[in-house]
Amino acid sequence: MALSLLLFGPYSLLLTPYQLKGEAVARVAVNVDHVATLRQARRASEPDPVTAAALAELAGAQGIVVHLREDRRHIQDRDVEILRRTVKTKLNLEMAATEEMVKIALRLKPDVVTLVPEKRQELTTEGGLDVVFYEESLKEVIKALHEGEIAVSLFINADPNQIKSAHRLESDYVEIHTGTFAEAATFSRRQEEFERVLTAVKLARKLGLGVHAGHGVDYRNVLWLRKIAEIEEFSIGHSIIARAVLVGIERAVQEMIALVNG
Ligand code: PXP
């Protein structure tokens, strides 16, 4: 609380109308894709997302997340291979549920695979994976990953039907898509979306699923989300890396961790 007051002034108090818990203790997992995006802008060797991941961990990050996209637009196979050997916390590999990606995951054995939808034209992952629609085909993918002793998370919209389907699929975690909440333009829209996320998180926990949250989480809106005690991990990329460019990754990670646990 003290840090949020320092960073954002008394307004931060107005941003947290929900007192759902006293002390939040959620993990912050840092997505380093954007570091690779900068490197790929020049097809150079720097900045290296592997170095960024190590620095993020030294600053207290409790997980490292990378999205190996089909078009390899940022993270490269080499990055995931090295990260698998160097990440000291937990490596979470975001990927599409394709044969190619499943093969890579089974070879590299990240701690967690987060299955996401993927379209070539999108700037970033635009919506949750429709696990209701793809339930049959996802069964095989999840079974294969579990046989490889890899935990599975499904990135889904805050929708009860998606959560029930994730439960039927015996997923270990769901990652609730917080993008719509993050982009809400008005206070009342944000409250509405917050309620949707809250309901989804509660249902997921009730069904025994571990709960992660991600997409669009930043240094301001995390003041809302941290009130949801059942969120055990935040997966955060853009806001942390954007801040890191200006203040350094150590400070950017530490400030986010302080807010999440404030
Ligand atoms: N979670 C998932 C499944 C994502 O695809 C992304 C974007 O790569 C994130 C979290 C992180 O989102 P952001 O970069 O907006 O923090």
Image: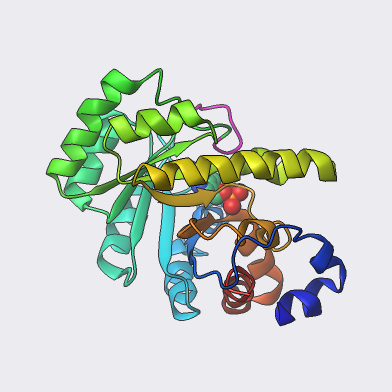
Side of 96 relative to 52 (left or right)? left
Q: Residue at 57% across / 27% down in the picture? A: 121
Q: Camera-side residue: 80 or 136?
A: 136
Total numbered labels: 0
Residue 217, horizontal then vertical, whole percent: 63, 54
Q: Residue at 36% across / 33% down in the picture? A: 166
Q: Residue at 24% across / 31% down in the picture? A: 141
Taken as a whole, is the magenta stretch helix, strand or loop?
loop
Side of 115 relative to 22 (left or right)? left
Residue 25, horizontal then vertical, whole percent: 50, 70
139 lies above or below 224 = above
Residue 15, horizontal then vertical, whole percent: 79, 60
Q: Camera-side residue: 178 or 35?
A: 178
Q: Look at the image and tell me whether residue 230 can be seen.
A: yes
Q: Camera-side residue: 198 or 248?
A: 198
Q: Camera-side residue: 24 or 56?
A: 24
Q: Is residue 123 magenta?
A: yes
Choose top left, top right, bottom left or bottom right for residue 170: top left
Residue 28, horizontal then vertical, whole percent: 50, 65
Q: Look at the image and tell me whether residue 40 can be seen.
A: no
In the picture, the quarter occupied by the N terminus is: bottom right
245 lies above or below 207 = below
Choose top left, top right, bottom left or bottom right for residue 35: bottom right
Q: Residue at 29% across / 36% down in the picture? A: 101
Q: Is residue 3 magenta?
A: no
Side of 242 relative to 107 (left or right)? right
243 lies above or below 137 = below
What range of the chain is rendered magenta? Answer: 119-125
